[in-house]
């Protein structure tokens, strides 16, 4: 089964295209292609990211037709109850987003980092971690594989804050991927010069994933020596101005964090105009100064998702790998049933996955990506979700 449903172009007006999905109309921005009515295309995050030949699209739509409506029914049925906080949030998710669930593949291309964030296992100070860097061509190859063979339509490239990848290298990566396998490309590379992000935007990168980690300036300064929250927020604001889709959020339960902070943290995420909210529980790493700290419960992490959904019906909310790590068997399902509607799957080449140890025992690093995808698609079907992101 596919990850995404192609839409039929009904209307083209300037940069906007109206697409039809079995009678549902959605809009998407088109910046990359010459496109006309009657053609078929994939949309992600509100952008047209690929055109698809009519014969191919019609075959995919044929195979979807029956399932599309069946999944909707299941989703509606499962969202009927609204007794608990999670159920309320799930109902709102269903009302505003229907059953669509977007899936991103993530490629972690380097675990070198110049920073010493106290919570992070790949911090510069940690001598115990084996370091790796993927070369430009290797990154492009992994991304092309993820789009062409694994059929991801949205990819996130993530690394520590690694200056080895200067602007030229990053631009070459973006150019290489977008020219061979266009997709919704997001970068998660920490703080860089705004000019570099401008250059990457020109090459077709449209997403920026950068968490602000905590809305408390004091906790921030303690956790990230030598850095300030203001500097981070300024960059996020600048990125949004450039046109980037912003994916941001915070760590739940950093030392000093109190439950009352949930609302402040969620509010800041919304104020930054985040297209996608990303909240992960802090999980202590044994080789960091925070090794002995406690962590929040799974219930608290789910409560954050539910609160965020109730307050921001239109946002995309991610089930983070950290949440899945807390309950490897049920975490994903619990997140999706507490208001989340986005997933990230690890498409990093197997030999590097264990080394990207921002926290220990990360979910998804012990299975082959192909079987992980199969598992996730089956889970989504059982919940009545369609693995697709239809656009606006
Ligand atoms: N537990 C959970 N998440 C972590 N991150 C870093 N260290 C940890 C940890 N110990 C998250 C940060 C960062 C993202 C890439 O990983 O929020 O932004």
Image (spheres, helix red, strand yellow):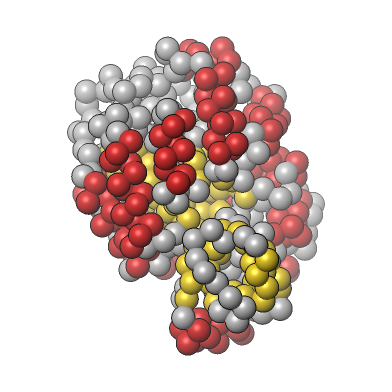
Residue at horizontal 46 percent and vertical 16 percent from the top = 227
Any part of residue 195 in sight? yes
Horizontal side of 378 relative to 373 (left or right) equals right
Q: Quadrant of residue 97?
A: bottom right
Residue 301 placement: quadrant:
top right
Label tally: 0
Counting from the top left corner in percent of width and height, residue 354 is at: 27, 43
Vertical placement of 255 versus 165: above or below?
A: above
Q: Position of residue 146 (x, y in %)?
A: 35, 61
Of 235 and 315, nearer the camera is 235
Which quarter of the rendered picture does the C terminus lie within?
bottom right
Residue in view at x 29 percent, y 43 percent: 109
Q: Nearer the viewer, residue 294 or 113?
A: 113
Of residues 76 and 14, the one nearer the viewer is: 14
Q: Would you place residue 376 above or below residue 69 in this image?
A: above
| Residue at x 38% of width, y 57% of height | 178
Q: Is residue 387 visible?
A: no
Residue drawn at x 41%, y 49% is 203
| In the image: residue 319, left or right of residue 122 | right
Q: Relative to 256, say whether 71 is above or below.
A: below
For this rendering, which residue is in front, 279 or 299?
A: 279
Classify residue 163 by image quadrant. Answer: top left
């Amino acid at each position: 089964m596919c990850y995404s449903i192609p839409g039929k172009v009904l209307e083209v007006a300037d940069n906007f295209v109206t697409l039809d999905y079995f009678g549902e109309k959605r809009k998407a921005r088109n910046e990359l292609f010459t496109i006309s009515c009657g053609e078929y295309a994939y949309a992600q995050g509100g952008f047209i990211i690929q055109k698809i030949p009519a014969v191919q699209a019609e075959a995919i739509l044929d195979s979807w037709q029956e399932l599309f409506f069946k999944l909707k029914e299941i989703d509606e049925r499962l969202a009927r109850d609204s007794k608990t906080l999670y159920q309320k949030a799930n109902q709102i998710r269903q009302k505003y987003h229907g059953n669509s669930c977007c899936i991103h593949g993530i490629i972690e291309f380097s675990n070198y980092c110049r920073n010493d964030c106290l919570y992070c296992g790949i911090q510069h100070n940690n001598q115990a971690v084996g370091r790796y860097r993927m070369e430009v061509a290797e990154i492009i190859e992994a991304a092309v594989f993820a789009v062409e063979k694994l059929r991801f339509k949205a990819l996130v490239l993530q690394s520590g804050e690694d200056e080895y990848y200067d602007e030229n290298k990053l631009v070459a990566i973006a150019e290489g991927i977008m020219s061979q396998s266009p997709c919704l490309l997001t970068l998660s590379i920490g703080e860089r010069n705004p000019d570099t992000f401008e250059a990457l935007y020109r090459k077709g990168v449209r997403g920026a994933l950068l968490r602000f980690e905590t809305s408390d300036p004091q906790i921030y300064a303690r956790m990230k020596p030598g850095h300030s929250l203001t500097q981070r927020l300024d960059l996020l604001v600048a990125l949004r101005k450039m046109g980037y889709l912003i994916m941001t959020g915070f760590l739940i339960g950093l030392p000093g964090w109190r439950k009352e902070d949930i609302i402040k943290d969620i509010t800041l995420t919304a104020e930054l105009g985040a297209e996608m909210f990303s909240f992960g529980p802090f999980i202590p790493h044994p080789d960091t100064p925070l090794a002995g700290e406690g962590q929040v419960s799974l219930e608290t992490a789910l409560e954050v998702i539910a609160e965020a959904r109730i307050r921001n019906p239109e946002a995309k909310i991610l089930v983070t790998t950290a949440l899945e790590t807390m309950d490897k068997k049920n975490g994903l399902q619990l997140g999706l049933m507490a208001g989340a509607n986005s997933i990230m799957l690890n498409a990093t080449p197997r030999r590097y996955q264990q080394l990207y140890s921002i926290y220990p025992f990360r979910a998804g690093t012990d299975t082959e990506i192909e079987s992980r995808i199969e598992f996730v698609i089956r889970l989504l079907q059982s919940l009545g979700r369609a693995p697709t992101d239809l656009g606006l």
